[in-house]
Amino acid sequence: MEDSHIIFGIHSVIEALKQDKDIEKINLLKDSDNPKLKEIEGLAKQSTIKVSYVPIQKFRKFESFNHQGVIAYSSQITYQNFESIVEASLESKTAPLFLLLDGITDVRNLGAILRTAECTGVDAVILPKSGSAQVNNETIKTSAGAAFHIPICKVDHLKDAIFYLKSSGVELIAATEKTDHCIYELNFNKPAALIMGGEGDGIHPSILKMADQQGKLPLLGDIESLNVSVACGVILYEAIRQKQFKL
């Protein structure tokens, strides 16, 4: 990550937190007795920002900076306001499509998904503040720059985003193998939000229960699952197919 996206020092990081800057994570010096580090940790937790206590070796490449045992990594993109994006999309389109990512932890998978989402006209990608891969250099590179072109929203909890979407008349579609329905049976010609689950566990059961519809992709070989970015691409292009041919 480039130095321009790193914030060094106690007071600088505290100020960034108080100003609600888009910070991905914070590293604090392990075994430090400086009480200000606890203050930083408390502020970070209020904003659901990941905090790690790391050994002095992690700070050695930043010795020329007055880091004071505190390094914050700010986002390289500007996250959009979730409610504003949803409202604007519903006003301008008859069948907007949103994408919610539940527990995608691999930055390359996230980048590939952002690239496909941008190419398929997804109106916004919604990520939880915790438990999700960061939009970092690798993500942006894998997305071929799509991360700068598609609205990305971060929310405290996906459940809250789902409640808001439902109250706005958006239908929630979960991609899961735990259903008898094929994704091709579902209707994308209405305001919809597609939920994709994480690489290992898929969609969390409590979120899966909130979906209005569930669909799976047919698998005809011996392998029981697709890479999440590949599966997401297949489903998004099914949505395009339905919309273009009015199916």
Image (spheres, helix red, strand yellow):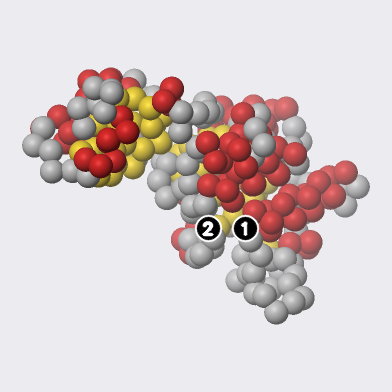
Q: Of 242 and 151, which appears nearest the observer?
A: 151
Which residue corresponds to the image point at 52% horizontal and 26% vertical from the top-left?
78
Number of numbered labels in the structure image:
2
Which residue corresponds to the image point at 15% horizontal and 29% vertical from the top-left?
36
Q: Which of the numbered marks, if any, corresponds to residue 228?
A: 1
Q: Is residue 44 visible to us here? A: no
Seen in the image, is 12 located left or right of residue 124? Answer: left
Q: Of 3 and 37, which appears nearest the observer?
A: 3
* Residue 62 place in picture, x, y as percent: 30, 29
Q: Secondary structure at mark 1?
A: helix
Cα separation between marks 1 and 2:
7 Å
Q: Is residue 152 visible to us here? A: yes
Q: Of 217 and 207, which appears nearest the observer?
A: 217
Seen in the image, is 194 located left or right of residue 69? Answer: right
Seen in the image, is 226 located left or right of residue 246? Answer: left
Mark 1, Cα crowd under 10 Å, few <14 / some 14-19 / many 20+, is: many
Mark 2, Cα crowd under 10 Å, few <14 / some 14-19 / many 20+, is: some
Q: Amino acid at mark 2?
A: Gly
The residue beneath circle 2 is: 198
Which residue corresponds to the image point at 61% horizontal and 29% vertical from the top-left?
148
Quarter of the view holding residue 118: top right
Q: Is residue 67 above or below residue 127?
A: above
Which residue corresponds to the image point at 68% horizontal and 41% vertical from the top-left?
115
Quarter of the view holding residue 144: top right
Q: Is residue 222 above or below residue 244?
A: below
Q: Are marks 1 and 2 in contact (CB under 8 Å)?
A: yes
Q: Secondary structure at mark 2?
A: loop
Q: Amino acid at mark 1?
A: Val
**Farthest-out residue, bottom:** 222
**Farthest-out residue, right:** 245
